[in-house]
Image (cartoon, rainbow, N blue to C red):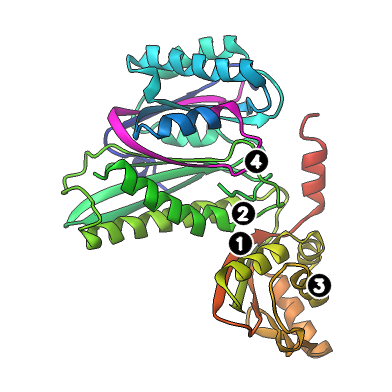
Amino acid sequence: MATENFLVQGFRAAAVNSGIRGKDRLDLALIVSDKPATVAGVFTTSLVKAAPVLLDMERCKTGKAQAILVNSGIANACTGEEGMRLARLTTAMAADALNIAPELVQVCSTGIIGQQLELACFQRGIPKAAQSLVGDGLADVAQAIMTTDTFRKIAVRTALIDGKPVKLLGMAKGAGMIMPNMATMLSFILTDAKIDHDLLQSVLKKVVAKTFNAITVDGDTSTNDTVLLMANGLAEHPPIAENRPEALAAFAAALEELCKELALLVVRDGEGATKLVTIRVRGAVTEAQADQAARTVANSNLVKTAFFGEDANWGRIIAALGRSGAQFDQSRVDIAFDDVFMVQNGLGQGAEVEARATAVLKKPEFVVTIDLHAGDGSKDIYTCDFSLDYVKINADYRS
């Protein structure tokens, strides 16, 4: 994607090396709006929340933000009162460098849990980043927030609101500790749309539920999961409002497309992953039970290792369904790999069908469709396989 696409009017950004992660890696970044923007946020549901998450949750309630300060390498999680003091202090340092109020600075951190931030790195990095802000700096920010990621994740959409173009740009990081339930997963979304805080928060919450909260790499939820959306209102259209349903629908659709693309990029880059798999449950008693069933299958280590081994082991899938809490009659369950029905009415379909299903599992992307024939509930969850490299990456993470 051409770098000229990584522009949203009124936003500038920069990423620098501050020394948090050695001498060569981008590890500290700023995203700045030329004017205070409407802000919305969705955060980790973990009871263990990092200091920056707690601070951002507090500041998001004001509905306004003008900058995001982010570092990689240290999560500033489980760091007590000192961690919160440093979160506030670093945002004050950023505010001073940008000549804005500290309350307008959101802050995010990703990296190792339990270590305190090194203040000297921020004292070096923040002024350097503030002096380097440019319109096309967002790609560098996407690079700076990577930890075990193997590629940067950026997506762009344009919505037409009353015939006027509205730009949305999003970036994300995440490859492990991914089962967001707002892993670490961070996402920053920028738009020039005009929309008030309450409506923006409502739209973002609904979109996150259908996108970022529908992915899993390893079933772990981070202390730092954060999605922040800033809308600076510079697009030339009347404000998006609930009493303007066409405008609202157009914006929400573009935001959902953007977030789904980013979410799938996170799964594709799952630590050691070689396959992207959609677990599609249909016919559950309720949507909530469909979610239970799909998520249990998607998080099963036995299922995920079978995907890696290209083994059409449907027994592991139906066993996971049985412990999911979803209600169904096992004699009515159908399971298909793409269009190959491995199980019909709860029974395997033999060696010839299994050979065709095994061919499906050799593909880099495929769909496992499970029909419980118990109701109208449905849910798609996106997951990946579980490879030898996943174990190696996480065994060596702090080495």
Q: Residue at x 79, y 83 (%)?
A: 355
**Which residue is identified by label 3?**
319
**Of the image marks 3 and 1, the number of the one nearer the N terminus:** 3
What kind of residue is marked 4? Ser
Secondary-structure class at tag 4: loop
Q: Which residue is mark 1?
A: 382
Q: CA distance from mark 2 to mark 1?
A: 7 Å
C-alpha gap between disc 3 and disc 1 = 19 Å
Find the distance from the CA under tag 4 to the CA under tag 2. Answer: 15 Å
Q: Position of residue 69 (x, y in %)?
A: 47, 25
Task: Give yes or no for residue 346 being in the magenta stretch.
Answer: no
Structural crowding at the residue carrying mark 1, measured as other residues with C-alpha within 10 Å and reported as few (<14), some (14–19) or many (≥20):
many
Residue at which label 4 appears: 222
Q: In the shown orientation, is residue 251 left or right of residue 55?
A: left
Of the residues under marks 4 and 2, which one precedes in the sequence?
A: 4
Depth check, mark 2 against mark 1: the one in front is: 1
Q: Nearer the viewer, residue 160 or 139?
A: 160
Q: Which mark is residue 267?
A: 2
Residue 51 within the segment the image draws in magenta: yes
Give yes or no for contact between labels 4 and 2 (Cβ–Cβ under 8 Å).
no
Q: Position of residue 397 (x, y in %)?
A: 76, 34
Image x and y of residue 39, in percent: 36, 37
Check disc 2 and give the amino acid type: Val
Look at label 1 and name its amino acid: Tyr
Is 394 or 77 nearer to us in this picture? 77
What range is drawn magenta here? 24-52
Circle 1 or circle 4, nearest the eye: 4
Q: Is residue 35 left or right of residue 367?
A: left
Say whether disc 4 or disc 3 marks the residue closer to the N-terminus. Answer: 4
Where disc 1 sits, the SS reads strand
